[in-house]
């Protein structure tokens, strides 16, 4: 592996830009940049650390981790590091040669296992694989490494509600966390239990059974989802296995939303997005249409509002606006483009009257509106993102930067080639092929 060239340079940048309109530019010298070099990949920050990777000439990959100062805190010598945000105990799954297990934030193995794969521990047990094949090497262990189910099973689909679902030798078997068999039945497939019910498949059709193995919802559907909040999606499939019409059932098997929709989302805050005959709207859990199914597209609700789109005669004539959860068009469809609301603001694109682009079409610029529809940050940008942790990415010509919710440039346009959020209050920057980090100026 090539020599690791990681080093950190901390400098104060001395650029300055002329502000546009009323928008004031932050002092560039206040931005302390941490340049981090020598890596082929740098991940997002989480719990104060970011995973880094170096590839050698044969594309062999080695992983390590840096802290927010750019210091290498875990040597780049692991074959894999999953990340420290995947578990509640602050550990990360890692592989180093023949050693597999969980490491702490110093890179020390605190738990080691002999298996080729160890899943997340759920209720103290985890699915493992004893080999590299797709079938025949699955088992279950507890956190001490004690074998609960030997690694000779064809497939173990999951652990849920105290039961482990096993497929082996043509049989579906459920065991408890001690490995004791509690249920065995014949089926093509059985899923894990959710809310007391598990999917069962026979003769290509799906239904649900309870923990005694009794079928409580008939096995008549082409497709069913797992139960969540007392409901499950059902669907018909075409000859190619693609879902066609969708609906919902409750835990009694009642189809409270019939299979008449071409698409249905999961319910969130009591509403689900639907598509019927290429038009979108929203329904509630009674099946009542609360937002008319008349839009060519509709977004998810963010900050209580969702953007809607109506197509024009061509793409330039498309119009966007916003609806509330009662279906009221609270912000009229007057925009050429519209994004999701975030932190009370949304980016929108409008045409600038009397100005034209190089193609002779009316010039379009992006700005930000509040939830009343008032343009609070002028439409002077060629592109704009959404607000997160108080800032938003914007672009003007070939120059990008960041603004706060007053429109002040906290990262002056053109200072860097690109800037993006990378978690934990840090921003990733790119400049002349180099990668660095700055602290979000708005974060304490």
Image (tube, rainbow, N blue to C red):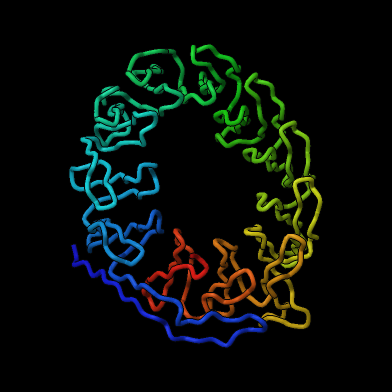
Residue 326 or residue 339, whichever sits in front:
326
Q: Nearer the viewer, residue 374 or 262?
A: 374
Q: Quadrant of residue 218?
A: top right
Residue placed at 65% from the left, 49% from the top? 300
Locate the N terminus by quadrant.
bottom left
Q: Which residue lies at the image location 77% right of the left edge and 61% below the top edge? A: 372
The location of residue 24, given as percent across then percent down, is 60, 81
Nearer-the-camera pick, 294 or 381: 381
Image: 386 above or below 137: below
The residue positioned farthest toward the front in the image shown: 444
The structure residue drawn at horizontal position 55% and vertical position 20%, both measured from the top left corner, is: 208
Q: Position of residue 39 (x, y in %)?
A: 30, 66
Q: In percent of the image, x 28 and y 69: which residue is there? A: 38
Give the side of residue 366 with respect to residue 427, left or right: right
Q: Position of residue 126 (x, y in %)?
A: 34, 31
Taking the image as drawn, is residue 78 in sight? yes
Horizontal and vertical percent position of residue 185? 44, 13
Whether residue 61 is visible, yes or no, is: no
Compared across the picture, whether 210 is left or right of 253 comes to: left
In the picture provided, is 116 more to the left or to the right than 368? left
Q: Is residue 296 above or below residue 432?
A: above
Name which quarter of the figure residue 318 lies in: bottom right
Q: Quadrant of residue 366?
A: bottom right
Q: Name the side, left or right, on which 190 lies relative to 434.
A: right
249 w.r.t. 300: above or below: above
Number of labels in the image equals 0
Q: On screen, 391 above or below 87?
A: below
């Amino acid at each position: 592996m090539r020599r690791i060239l990681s080093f950190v340079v901390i400098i104060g940048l001395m650029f300055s830009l002329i502000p546009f309109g009323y928008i004031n530019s932050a002092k560039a010298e206040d931005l302390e940049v941490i340049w981090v070099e020598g890596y082929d990949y740098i991940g997002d920050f989480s719990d104060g650390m970011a995973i880094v990777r170096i590839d050698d000439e044969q594309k062999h990959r080695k992983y390590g981790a840096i802290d927010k100062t750019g210091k290498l805190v875990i040597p780049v010598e692991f074959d894999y590091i999953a990340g420290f945000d995947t578990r509640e105990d602050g550990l990360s799954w890692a592989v180093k040669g023949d050693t597999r297990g969980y490491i702490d934030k110093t890179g020390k193995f605190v738990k080691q296992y002999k298996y080729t794969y160890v899943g997340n521990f759920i209720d103290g047990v985890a699915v493992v694989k004893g080999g590299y094949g797709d079938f025949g090497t699955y088992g279950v262990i507890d956190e001490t490494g004690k074998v609960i189910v030997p690694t000779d099973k064809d497939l173990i689909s999951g652990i849920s509600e105290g039961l482990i679902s096993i497929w082996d030798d043509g049989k579906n078997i459920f065991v408890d966390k001690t490995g004791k068999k509690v249920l065995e039945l014949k089926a093509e497939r059985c899923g894990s239990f959710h809310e007391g019910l598990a999917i069962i498949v026979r003769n290509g059709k799906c239904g649900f059974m309870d923990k005694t193995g009794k079928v409580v919802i008939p096995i008549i559907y082409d497709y069913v989802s797992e139960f969540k909040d007392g409901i499950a999606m059902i669907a018909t499939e075409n000859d190619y296995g693609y879902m066609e019409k969708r609906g919902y059932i409750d835990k009694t098997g009642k189809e409270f939303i019939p299979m008449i929709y071409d698409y249905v989302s999961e319910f969130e805050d009591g509403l689900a997005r639907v598509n019927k005959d290429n038009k979108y709207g929203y329904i509630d859990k009674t099946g009542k249409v609360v937002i008319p199914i008349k839009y060519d597209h509709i977004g998810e609700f963010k900050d209580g509002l969702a953007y809607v789109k109506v197509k024009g005669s061509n793409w330039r004539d498309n119009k966007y606006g916003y609806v509330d959860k009662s279906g009221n068009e609270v912000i009229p469809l007057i925009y050429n483009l519209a994004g999701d609301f975030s932190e009370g603001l949304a980016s929108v694109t409008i045409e600038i009257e009397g100005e034209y682009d190089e193609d002779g079409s009316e010039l379009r610029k992006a700005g930000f509106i509040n939830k009343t529809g008032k343009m609070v940050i002028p439409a002077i940008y060629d592109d704009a993102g959404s607000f997160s942790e108080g800032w938003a990415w914007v672009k003007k010509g070939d120059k990008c930067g960041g603004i706060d919710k007053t429109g002040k440039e906290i990262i002056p346009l053109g200072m860097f080639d690109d800037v993006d959020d990378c978690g934990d209050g840090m921003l990733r920057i790119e400049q002349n092929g180099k990668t660095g980090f700055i602290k979000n100026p708005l974060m304490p």
